[in-house]
Image (cartoon, rainbow, N blue to C red):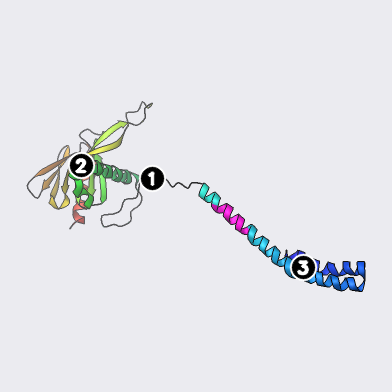
Amino acid sequence: GFLKGFSGGGRKPMKGAQKDGVGGFFKGVAQGAVGLIVQPIVGVADGISQASEGIRNTTEAAHATPIMARRMRPPRTLGFHGELQPYSRADAEAQAILGSSIGAAGRAAITLREGRFFRHCQCGARPKQPDRLLVLTTTHVVLLALVLVPAGASSSSSDTVARKATIEWFEPLANVGVPEEFSEEIGLHLRNGGLRFVPCADSHTRRLARQILNEALRGIV
């Protein structure tokens, strides 16, 4: 529009002079002046209209295309006092299992909602076949019974994967005294005089269980 208006302003007088002489020249000047004003304005309007149409088409395409965000991994866990930790998928999955178990237990486990996941370890009565999940939160120690299924329907491996868990027992950390290691389990001496047991046939698992228990107990001091 701009270029067309400016070029028209120069051509009109020349064409008028060739056709009608001096009178045509001045007539062409007048026509060119009108074109010099009107056509650039029309060109700007056309540009704005085309830009608006492009924006509208882009917006409509964005609305027509569904944007679905799907989490690719379980949420990160935090330290006892909320500090950021390196991402651990094992802790993240244990946190998710705990959350599902609390939800399934309903009002019976409502006090567990007061705390936040801290640490965990897998354990069990048989070595290398964990069927329990010891979970420490910022307020409780929880023992979950794992429901195990084969790793793959077509797999010949004996590996198992926990799909869900049920709460076997839980105690407030404030009621836990000293964890004691026995030959195949960890015993928790409770301040109210009771005793809880965590089956740990593997010596390495027993050490890990005692470590995370002591970390949680130190955290509430």
Q: Position of residue 116 (x, y in %)?
A: 25, 51
Query: Which type of secondary structure does the marked residue at label 1 adopt?
Result: loop
- Boundaries of the magenta span: 51-59
Dot 2 or dot 1: first in sequence order is 1
Residue drawn at (35%, 28%) of the image: 157
Could you tell me the amino acid type at mark 3? Gly
Our reading of the magenta stretch's main secondary structure is: helix
Marks 2 and 1, how far apart at CA: 24 Å
Residue drawn at (13%, 49%) of the image: 178
Q: Would you identify the image quadrant in which residue 107 lies?
A: top left
Query: Which type of secondary structure does the marked residue at label 3 adopt?
Result: helix
For label 3, the crowd category at 10 Å Cα-Cα, with few meaning under 14, some 14 to 19 and many 20 or more, is: many
Could you tell me the amino acid type at mark 1? Arg
In magenta stretch: residue 42: no
Could you tell me the amino acid type at mark 2? Leu
Number of numbered markers: 3
In magenta stretch: residue 57: yes
Residue 166 appears in the picture as rendered: yes
